[in-house]
């Protein structure tokens, strides 16, 4: 039975809800009154569109408040592309395992795709007790509709209390679609996840108000508690191929004929920087003074076999493309070595790099905040220090 309720006495037949429904679940009947079909997912998108408040979702709210204790277990979505799981998913699995242990419950991984059973086994090695494997040609490439509907059905059937997804492009898209259809809360781009001991609620920490404060968000009244976490925020766990777990096969819920989108082709962008996986990053900020100021930064990065990063100030000035930006609104990185050149170390920049294993700061201002988090600081002109370092490494590394 559809969960949306329509007050037939109030409805004036304006049709606004019909156009608003993303699932085509609403239409006007012969008396010009709105009617809802079984396609309704209780997403709630139509409710605010009605000018006379004739729509409501009372059963959803009631059911969720009553049944909250029935939700158990921690879930993670395992993102894959062409049969290869993304490392962000295993970071999620590692953190999910810790949360599940804190709660004394199980960790479940959701693997969706086509010919992806090997990923289900990997998920167990990375800490899952159970894997829902939905292997179907309609899921071969990521599309919002079939993936979201599949996860929504799994959640409705098995009721997890926590559901974590990586904050990749696909993860962000999918998490929003799933949370909306489930009528639950979602905290995007978390930088920390923990369990509140008194309540067992998920504590979801993320920057707020432009990164000036860290907010800890709870979702007490709806389930599952959903969060996305950016790449490199959590450490990559070490897989244990001897771990045992259960693989549960589930069916895809949408046929190809029901899916509106078709993937025509994938075009891999040439020269794309992969900051997230770089072991060494040399970054430049406003102190490099112009696009040509990145030349010594690039030379040092090349000699060290690393990637080039940048502060937002350098990106906003148009000196280097956005793909290089490190920070709250750029990439989160966790390299073995991060060399910040002419970067003051604003909190929004730190948000993307402060968990780097070794931080070296080069800045002519000894009071620059970057020195507070740097393991090694060099006070000086980067245009002298960086070429000198490049030369020294070139000799040391025989390059
Ligand atoms: P500045 O703060 O101007 O620092 C330049 C530094 O270079 C100074 O410390 C100076 O002493 C030093 N310097 C100058 N000349 C030399 C020289 N010759 N040799 C050595 N040192 C020299 N910023 C990010 O980086 N990433 C983000 O993702 C990001 N997201 C943001 C999101 C929001 C919502 C907001 C409000 C801001 C965000 N910012 C971000 C901007 C951030 O607040 C800072 O403005 C920015 O990081 C400053 O960049 P910078 O350190 O390169 O420049
Ligand atoms: Fe459509 Fe969502 Fe309204 Fe249901 S609640 S009729 S799915 S817009
Ligand atoms: Fe009726 Fe409200 Fe839908 Fe208009 S938006 S057709 S008034 S239910």
Image: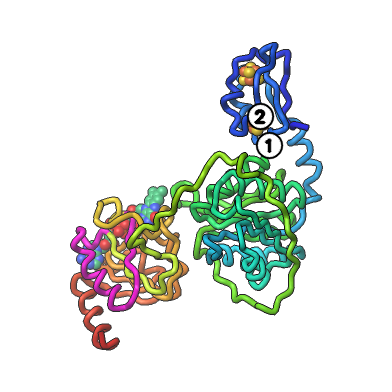
In the foreground, 361 or 330 = 330
Q: Does the residue labelled 1 lie within 8 Å of ligand 2?
A: yes
In the foreground, 248 or 56 = 248
The image quadrant in which ligand 3 is located: top right
When asked about the image quadrant of residue 294, the answer is bottom left
For the residues labelled 1 and 2, say whether their Cβ atoms are less than 8 Å apart. yes
Q: Which of marks 1 and 2 is in front?
A: 2
- The tag on residue 29 is none
Range of magenta residues: 286-312
In the figure, 130 relative to 46: above or below? below
At x 26%, y 88%, the residue is 398
Q: How many labels does the image show?
A: 2
Q: Colour mode?
A: rainbow
Pinpoint residue 282: horizontal percent, then vertical percent: 32, 70
Crowding near pointer 2: few (<14 within 10 Å), some, many (20+)? many
Would residue 322 be counted in the magenta stretch?
no
Which residue matches tag 2? 25
Pinpoint residue 23: horizontal percent, then vertical percent: 62, 33
In the figure, 156 relative to 90: above or below? above
Mark closest to the chain's N terminus, 1 or 2:
2
> Of helix, strand and loop, which one carries label 2?
loop
State whether the magenta stretch is mostly helix, strand or loop: helix
Residue 30 horizontal side relative to residue 294, left or right: right
Which residue matches tag 1? 41
């Amino acid at each position: 039975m559809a969960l949306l309720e329509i007050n037939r006495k109030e409805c004036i037949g304006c049709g606004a809800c019909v156009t608003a429904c993303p699932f085509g679940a609403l239409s006007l009947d012969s008396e010009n009154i709105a009617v809802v079909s079984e396609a309704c997912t209780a997403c709630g998108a139509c409710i605010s569109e009605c000018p006379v408040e004739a729509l409501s979702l009372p059963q959803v709210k009631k059911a969720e408040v009553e049944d909250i204790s029935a939700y158990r277990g921690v879930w993670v979505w395992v993102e894959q592309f062409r049969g290869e799981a993304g490392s962000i998913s295993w970071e999620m699995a590692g953190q999910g395992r810790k949360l599940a242990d804190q709660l004394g419950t199980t960790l479940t991984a959701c693997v969706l795709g086509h010919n992806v059973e090997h990923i289900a086994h990997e998920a167990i090695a990375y800490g899952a007790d159970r894997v829902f494997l939905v292997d179907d040609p309609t899921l071969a490439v990521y599309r919002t509709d079939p993936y979201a509907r599949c996860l929504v059905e799994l959640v409705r059937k098995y009721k997890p209390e926590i559901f974590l997804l990586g904050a990749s492009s696909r993860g962000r898209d999918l998490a929003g679609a799933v949370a909306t259809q489930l009528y639950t809360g979602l905290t995007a781009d978390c930088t920390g996840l923990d369990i509140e001991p008194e309540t067992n609620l998920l504590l979801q920490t993320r920057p707020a108000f432009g990164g000036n404060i860290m907010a800890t968000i709870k979702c007490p009244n709806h389930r599952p508690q959903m969060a996305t976490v950016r790449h490199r925020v959590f450490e990559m766990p070490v897989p244990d191929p001897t771990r045992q777990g259960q693989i549960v096969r589930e069916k895809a819920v949408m046929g190809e004929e029901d899916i509106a989108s078709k993937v025509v082709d994938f075009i891999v962008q040439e020269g794309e920087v992969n900051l997230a996986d770089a072991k060494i990053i040399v970054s430049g900020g406003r102190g490099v003074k112009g696009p040509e100021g990145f030349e010594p930064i690039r030379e040092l990065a090349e000699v060290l076999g690393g990637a080039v990063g940048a502060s937002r100030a350098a990106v906003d000035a148009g000196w280097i493309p956005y793909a290089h930006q490190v920070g709250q609104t750029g990439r989160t990185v966790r390299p073995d070595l991060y060399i910040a050149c002419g970067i003051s170390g604003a909190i929004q920049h730190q948000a993307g790099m402060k968990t780097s294993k070794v931080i070296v700061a080069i800045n002519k201002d000894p009071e620059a905040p970057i020195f507070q988090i740097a393991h090694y600081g060099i006070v000086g002109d980067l245009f002298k220090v960086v070429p000198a370092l490049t030369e020294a490494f070139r000799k040391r590394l025989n390059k």
